[in-house]
Amino acid sequence: MVPTVDGCGSFVSHELYGRDNAANPFTKLATLGTNAATQIVAPLPNKKKWELYLATLYACNGTDTLFSNTVFIDDQPPTYIEPDSVSVDFITQQIRVGWSKSPEPDVMGYSIFKIDPTTGNNLLIDEQSVLTYLFLTSTFNSINPNHKIEIAAYDSCKNGGVISNFHSPVCLSFNTPLNANYLCTKQLHIKWTAYVGWPISSYDVYVWDSKSNTWKLDGTVNGSTLNYIYAIPNLGENYNFYIRAHKSIGSITSSSNVVKITLANFSKPLYNMIGHVSVIDNNTIEVTGTWEPNANINKAVLQTKPYGTSAWSQLYVANVSAGKLLYIDKGKTTNYLKYDYRILLYNSCNVPYDSSAIHTNILLTKSLYALTWNDYWAWKNSTYNTNLNQRARQGSTWNTKNTEPDSSYILADTAKPECYRVASILKGINNKSVDTTWSNEICLRAFDTTLIPGGFTPGGINPTFLIINPNIQLGEARMQIYNRWGAKIFDGDALTGWDGKDGKEEYVGPGFYPYLVSILRPESRETYKGVVMVLR
């Protein structure tokens, strides 16, 4: 130590001692007689490695000498060092360089350089006595590629070592704007620049898992590959990615910048809805619908299925740009079945991506003494009325009998010739009617008796065997005739009847022939078995 105050007046001088070989004794190199001095200058006889110390004569007792620690100095620059890795800090997204400590004891710090991209010259950024350095984004922005970073150690004599080879971190990026094809392929093409500075064995692709709040390894590619195809699990969500490079030898790695990206889904229309599913007659249903046309819609398809089943079938492909449809669905059995309908929109990838609510027709059925019907469920979250309407069978004026969804009505007189149907009326602003959907119609039948004759004469005065019931319509009754051996020789409509011929268009012989008559009506199913006598 060097005293700055000589309170007892015993100071004599500062003396600098040194040697250039550990086997030699220290020799005096310089003397300085100023107590308050903070430096001493002495020429060295050669350029060898010198070991130095400072002695101060005397202490306040007038006899003791104070000695400093020893230091080594030389004019040889520090040995070559190189960055261990250059990475991007997860938190700040600043580029961070790290290196190992130089082995020379007189190394005082490290110079950090970058290569000027315009001139290729080395630019000194900073000098610090640290082993890791975080660059300002104004110096290096991690979202830009090809940052060339170098370091060199310097010693106590400001001798700088050889500047290292440059290192460049991995820079992750995407094509901007994204190719909309990812919406169809559900694949995202990721690319990055190579790590420069040491050989790479592989690159890891990490994705942020928002559910577990952790980074998860999605895949690994070899060190010569600079791209990756990510399978997108869900569109319309945010995703974070980064790349980690692995050095071929050892366990050193380097991380890229983090890229946050939103993988937008197709924009859905503001509305896509069925207006009504309304029964026209026993075989026909009318369906209306509307949707907002937009560029993402490639196809609008009306689908149907029997209520309670799962397999949808395609009915109609609408004009997308029209934004509406009116479809008459024939061939249904509306007097005892319900049907589901929906409008399914397909995006420009021809993949279903938006469905309307499911609409089901109202089915009115009759038991022995009651009428029962289902609500028009698609309107359950809207304002609407459900009415049971009645008219005389020969009349045209409908009267409201009951107002209930999912309900039933007890018939006072099942033999009275009346017709019934259910109407659901959707209400809008100021309780005005917006739309109406109808159920099938059921008519009660007076004197409902089925007459089946016991015999007939094919080709004669009474040439046809048929049933008689004015309340039964064509298509509601089936007749099957069998011969004496049990073989079926006729199968047809019971109202049209059998003319007495076999399957070969020849009249059968006289005798008794078993028959089976099946009647299927909206309110009942009937079966009649017997034998008919053929007379010739």
Image (tube, rainbow, N blue to C red):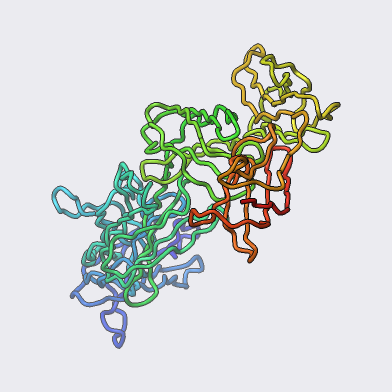
x and y, in percent, of residue 491 in the image: 58, 52
Q: Is residue 154 above or below residue 347?
A: below
Q: Is residue 41 visible?
A: no
* Residue in the foreground of this view, choosing between 465 and 198: 465
Query: Quadrant location of the N terminus?
Result: bottom left
* Residue in the foreground of this view, choosing between 58 and 341: 341
Q: Is residue 512 left or right of residue 301?
A: right
Residue at 16% across, 53% down: 121
Total marks drawn? 0
Quadrant in the picture for residue 371:
top right
Q: Going by the picture, which residue comes out furthest to the bottom?
A: 23
x and y, in percent, of residue 235 in the image: 45, 47
* Residue in the foreground of this view, choosing between 236 and 28: 236
Residue at 61% across, 22% down: 436
Q: Is residue 491 left or right of residue 525?
A: left
x and y, in percent, of residue 17 in the image: 32, 74
Q: Is residue 88 above or below residue 17?
A: above
Q: Is residue 314 left or right of residue 41?
A: right
* Residue in the foreground of this view, choosing between 263 and 31: 263
Q: Is residue 166 visible?
A: yes
x and y, in percent, of residue 368 in the image: 82, 37
Q: Is residue 348 above or below residue 276?
A: below
Quadrant in the picture for residue 372:
top right
Q: Going by the picture, which residue comes out furthest to the left?
A: 119
Q: Going by the picture, which residue comes out furthest to the front?
A: 536
Q: Going by the picture, which residue comes out furthest to the top?
A: 430
